[in-house]
Image (cartoon, rainbow, N blue to C red):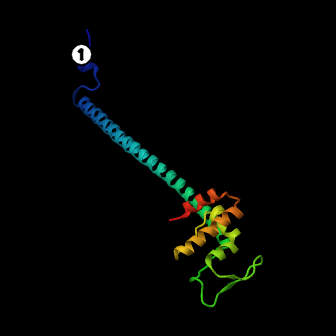
Amino acid sequence: MTPSLSQTSPFHGSVGGVAIRRLKQKIKNIEEMVISLDDKIQNMDGEMKENETLREQIRSLEEANKAQGQERKELEKRIKKLEGEKSQLESRLSKQEDKNKQLNDNLKELDAYIQDLLLVNGKVIYKQLVQKDGHIYICGSEDMADGVQQSLMAIFQDFGKHSPEKAQNFIRKMKV
């Protein structure tokens, strides 16, 4: 005769029912833990993506900071270079009554017209305007402006060895 289920099953009866309920509860607890772990893994994935985004932002900021540092160093070099160079400002109010005189090693006394001062300082003027990308600001009468233009033409031809056409083109580009 074959044994009945009640005889072979250790979970039969009230003791067996309690064991089944406990196992079902443990399975339910394990399922909840798995769901909780899945949620935590998803949260960690999100945090990892967020951290990677932050790392990328940090790298980008570091690169920008490095570039700014290099730019700053370059600007500091340019400032030091400019500070080392002499800048000069000459101011004249037409030909003054007392005939201000300008002395030069190569020339005798000159009346202090601005176009004469440009010629006296021709080498420096050429270097500043052409080699250093400098600027010259002139205001005054048309006659004075014509004299300044003639002086600049002479400077470009003498110190830059430019043809009259090339000197004229350079002066034309300088005009505002």
Q: Quadrant of residue 143?
A: bottom right
Q: Residue furthest top?
A: 1
Q: Which residue is identified by label 1? A: 4
Measuring 63% from the left and 60% from the top, which residue is drawn there? 167
Measuring 67% from the left and 66% from the top, which residue is drawn there? 154
The percent coordinates of residue 32 (x first, y second) are 31, 39
Q: How many marks?
A: 1
Q: Residue furthest front?
A: 143
Measuring 40% from the left and 44% from the top, which residue is drawn there? 44
The percent coordinates of residue 160 (x first, y second) are 69, 61
In this picture, residue 75 sits left or right of residue 32: right
Measuring 56% from the left and 75% from the top, which residue is drawn there? 144
The percent coordinates of residue 164 (x first, y second) are 64, 59
Between residue 156 and residue 13, name the one nearer to us.
156
Q: Quadrant of residue 25?
A: top left
- Mark 1, Cα crowd under 10 Å, few <14 / some 14-19 / many 20+, is few
Residue 169 visible somewhere in the drawing: yes
- Secondary element under disc 1, as helix, strand or loop, is loop
Is 85 situated above or below 8? below
Q: Quadrant of the N terminus?
A: top left
Amino acid found under the numbered disc labelled 1: Ser
Is 108 situated above or below 27? below
Between residue 18 and residue 132, name the one nearer to us.
132
Residue 137 visible somewhere in the drawing: no
Q: Quadrant of residue 168?
A: bottom right
Q: Residue furthest right?
A: 105
The percent coordinates of residue 142 (x first, y second) are 52, 73
Between residue 85 and residue 57, name the one nearer to us.
85
Between residue 38 and residue 127, name the one nearer to us.
127
